[in-house]
Structures are given as C-alpha cells and as structure tokens.
Image: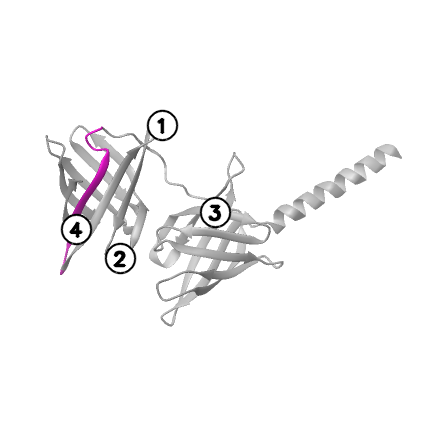
Amino acid sequence: MITRSLFVAGAVFLFASLGCAQGGPDGHWVGTFTAENREITLSLDLTRNAKLEWIASMGMPAEKAAGLVVTDVTVDGKSVKFVAVELMMAKFDLTLGDDQTMKGTFSTRQGPLAVALKRTGAAKVELIPASPAVSKALEGDWEGSLQTPGRAVRMIVHFKNQADQTVAATVDTPDSGAVGLPLNAVKQNGLKVEFGMKIAQSVFQGTLNAEGTELAGQLMHEDSGMPLTLRKK
C-alpha cells in the first residue's frame, strides 16, 4: 500500500509539473498584428538556457527574416516582456492566457500596437554565434555614411572585445533612431574586415588603413554593393 501511495503521489507530481510547464511561455509562437491596414505575421521562440535564463528570438516570415535578436526577456507569472532589437527596439508587453495564447501590445513610433500569438510547437531559439575578438586597431567606435540611392544613411559601428575572447559588435543608425542592432559573423584577417547585418541580409567587406583610422569598403546585398567608409571616433 505504501509503495502504491508513493507511486500515485509521484504520478500526481509528474503530471502537475507537466501541466505547469505547458502552462508557461516556453514554445514556438506565431501571431499577427495590423499596421497601415496590413496584417503582418511574426513568430517568437522562447525558452530557458542551461543557466535557466529566458532566451528568445523572433522572425518575420514574409520578410524571410529569422533569428531576430531579442533582449531583456522578463517572465513573471503570466507576464512576458522583452525588447525586439531589430524591430526598432520595440518593447513587447504580453500576457499568457489559459488557451495557449499570448496577447498584448508592443511599442512603435505611432503608439502601441495590439498583437496576439498562439503556441504552435516547441521553441527553436536562434542566437547569433559568437565572433572572435578583433585587433586593438579595430576595437572601438566607427562612424560613417552608407551611400544609398538618393540619400546617405549615417551609421555608427561599435566593436568591443569581451573577456571570453569574443567581440560584441553592433551598429546604430541615428537618423532612424535604431540603436544596438547586432552585427554577426565578424571576421578580421590582417587589414581585411568583414561583418554581417542579418536584418538587412547584407555583408560588409572592407579594408582597414595602415594608420587604423579608416575602414573603407562596400555593403553587399545579393549581387550589388553600396560604398561605406567608416572613420574611427
């Protein structure tokens, strides 16, 4: 009888744990929001890492954009908050429902927009792989303008080496108000420098001058390129 009671108690605990896990925000979520009379689909992958920290990434299928960076993830009961870095630093404030949904709003320049998500499967978070540390000559802040048809777009690129021998690389575009957009696949081979801008599906390829004061090259998108010269601040 004692053994049976322990078995029953264990089973109850197991199913209760499974119920709690399913009731949490872990998973792959798909939903929509409406902007300028157009319905836009987005996805959210949310889970815990080995340190039990919440991590996430987003996607926009229509734009063929996946692995968009999410930071500042906070889960408190049924409240889920995070910042979508590559969506103009949009702040999401969602509430987990009892019907496998999350609903809430996210911030835009025009004000908050309503968004509703539904859990469709297990989470598959895509994080940007770490890039190796860069030289002291490249480390720091770089400013320049991307020469696009019709106008120049100001850009500020930051390279900051980390204690684990990797580099944190981001770009700001002051004219659009975007700050801290992540760069990926940073590579340096002598004076040759390359890095990716995943949100723009583009890759910069350039050369650092001997003085370490100028980085000149092109931002490549598919088969075309736009000149970009960055100067150290």
**Looking at the rendering, in which quadrant would you find the N terminus?**
top right
Q: Earlier in the sequence, mark 1 or mark 4?
A: 4
| Amino acid type, residue under disc 1 in the picture | Ala
**Distance Cα–Cα, label 1 vs label 4:** 31 Å
In the orientation shown, which residue stands out farthest toward the left? 210
Mark 4: give few (<14), some (14-19) or many (20+) Cα within 10 Å.
some
Mark 2: give few (<14), some (14-19) or many (20+) Cα within 10 Å.
few
Helix, strand or loop at mark 3: strand
**Distance Cα–Cα, label 2 vs label 1:** 32 Å
Q: Is residue 145 magenta?
A: yes
Within the image, what quadrant is residue 129 found in? top left
Image coordinates for residue 179, horizontal then vertical, percent: 31, 49
Mark 1: give few (<14), some (14-19) or many (20+) Cα within 10 Å.
few
Q: Is residue 71 magenta?
A: no
105 sits to left or right of 186: right
Q: Which mark is residue 146?
A: 4
Camera-nearest label, 2 or 4: 2
| Amino acid type, residue under disc 4 in the picture | Leu
Q: Earlier in the sequence, mark 3 or mark 1?
A: 3
Contact (Cβ within 8 Å) of mark 2 with mark 3: no
Residue with the mark numbered 3: 73
Q: Main secondary structure of the magenta part?
A: strand
Helix, strand or loop at mark 4: strand
Q: Which mark is residue 163?
A: 1
Image coordinates for residue 191, horizontal then vertical, percent: 15, 31
Camera-nearest label, 4 or 3: 3
Residue with the mark numbered 2: 176
Camera-nearest label, 1 or 4: 1
